[in-house]
Image (cartoon, rainbow, N blue to C red):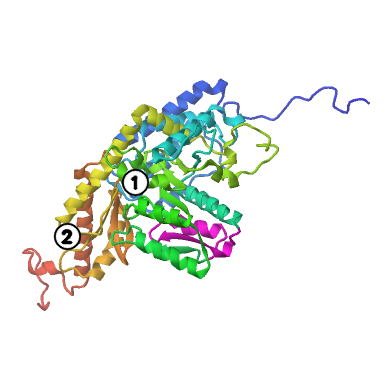
Amino acid sequence: MPSRLPAATQPVTTKHDTTALVRGATASAYADTVHEVARDVAARLASVTQPFSGASRAELRDLVAAVDLDGPPSGTSEALREAADLYATHAIWFHAPTYAAHLNCPVALPAVGAETMLAAINTSVDTYDQSTVATLMERRLVEWTAGRIGFPVDGGEGPGADGVFTSGGTQSNFQALFLAREKARRTGVRLESMRILATEVSHFSIAKSALLLGLPDDAVVAVGTDADGRMSADALARTLVDVERTGDVVVAVVATAGTTDRGCIDPLGPVADLCDAVGTWLHVDAAYGCGLLVSPTRRHLLAGIERARSVTVDFHKSFFQPVSSSALIVRERADLAPVAWHADYLNPEENAEPNQVDKSLQTTRRFDALKLWVTLRALGPDGVGAMVDAVCDLAAAVHQDLAGDHDFRLVGTTDLSTVLFRYQPDGLDPARADALVPQVRRVLFDSGRALVAKTVIDGRPCLKLTLLNPDATLADIRGVLELVRSAAHGLLAGEALADTDEPPCRDVHPRLERAEGEDR
């Protein structure tokens, strides 16, 4: 039979920009582009004096809307300059010492270098044939982390610990609870009977995960805490009994090693004792507190974490990594099996290659592990741990400062690096102090000079400093507190002026004469 293909292939006539992609022919342009961006960012790093420009949302919305995304191409250099003027100028700079709002950290220099490498190479670590050595490097880091936790490690050949990198703590917590759910399902527990025990101050992703996993609305049962917000082992014991009496089944207990607001660590050993006694899954959310795994002085605060069934670690919090860099680590490799899903075109079941997609909720996934690898090689675990200790030491010093300041009231203690406080000098009505919290935060945010967070503790609003910059000094944080004090003074003075029928300065300022006929 004669071929139906044309005798001569027609030449491709479609035109495209052959300098647009990173490849051998554009290697020099790639280097120039990276250098250009690096020089601009370096200049901004050196000149930043406050964490935010202070531009209003309306101003930023107008700047964004003014960019014509369907307009004619401007070329790489111009497009990057435009992006720098828009994004970098108005970004939140976490390296600024007066940034103290959320769990964001300045990033390790070697990790940023690794980010440049992995972005250009663009590895996806879902299957071995797309990643090769990257898969092996990630697996080595998972094993290293498991060893730091205290899980048994066996080089990937036996029943020891395992895990996978994730996009963040929310995904890690979700996957851990999915694994716990599947373990319970295999023993015949119905979804409507499943219960998860956690404190009310556990991360919101616990309740969100229960929802996404199809569990009942009341699946997450609150466990009582002590005065500092740590899970009470006695309360956990009572709750375990109460749930059993209802006929429901506790499929997981979630302990937190570093609560988001207080930075407190649940008593992991006593919690593990109870979980072992009833045979339930213990998950430790150490997204914030994982830095203690390498702390030279505070590792003991995580005593008992090695008895968990699964652990969340967020390297992009306490290991000073660029987002994203997180992982879920499990004590027993077999626990990850329910995640596996095989496709003939990607990871056929008979394939013996180490495919990370078999463990991950994601398919395409960046080689974020490279950033941590380079950081550990450049700084060493003790070097990272020293930075963790530095932020914890700074928080302790700020607590001590505030304890002696009559304008501020401390709210609780911390095991890590948060500071909860209120502006409430003697004589200020508590309700007025409540109202000042969001107002002070907004004044500081709008100025761009300092960023602090707000939260609610035991029903009362308070301000929060989250200290994750090991290069910030006590003087830097005292400066932030002075801005808080000044903002509160100004707000109260403005209210007093608004409530006064006549300007209060008229009786005290010698050059302001009262108008004729004006009553005194």
Residue under pointer 1: 303
Depth-wise, is mark 1 or mark 2 nearer the camera? 1
> Taking 9 as reference, is 356 above or below it?
below
Residue type highlighted by circle 1: Ala
The secondary structure type at the circle numbered 1 is loop
Residue under pointer 2: 407
Residue type highlighted by circle 2: Asp
Horizontally, residue 80 falls left or right of residue 424, namely right
The secondary structure type at the circle numbered 2 is loop
Residue that appears at 52% across and 30% down: 136
* Residue 184 % position (x, y): 56, 56
* Residue 49 % position (x, y): 27, 41
> What separation in Å lies between label 1 and label 2 (alpha carbons)?
37 Å
Residue that appears at 48% across and 47% down: 172
The quadrant the N terminus occupies is top right
Horizontally, residue 182 falls left or right of residue 401, namely right
Residue that appears at 11% across and 68% down: 506
Magenta range: 188-216
Q: Is residue 283 magenta?
A: no
Residue that appears at 48% across and 50% down: 173
**Residue 411 occupies quadrant:** bottom left
**Residue 388 occupies quadrant:** top left
Which class describes the residues within 10 Å of circle 2: few (<14), some (14-19), or many (20+)? some
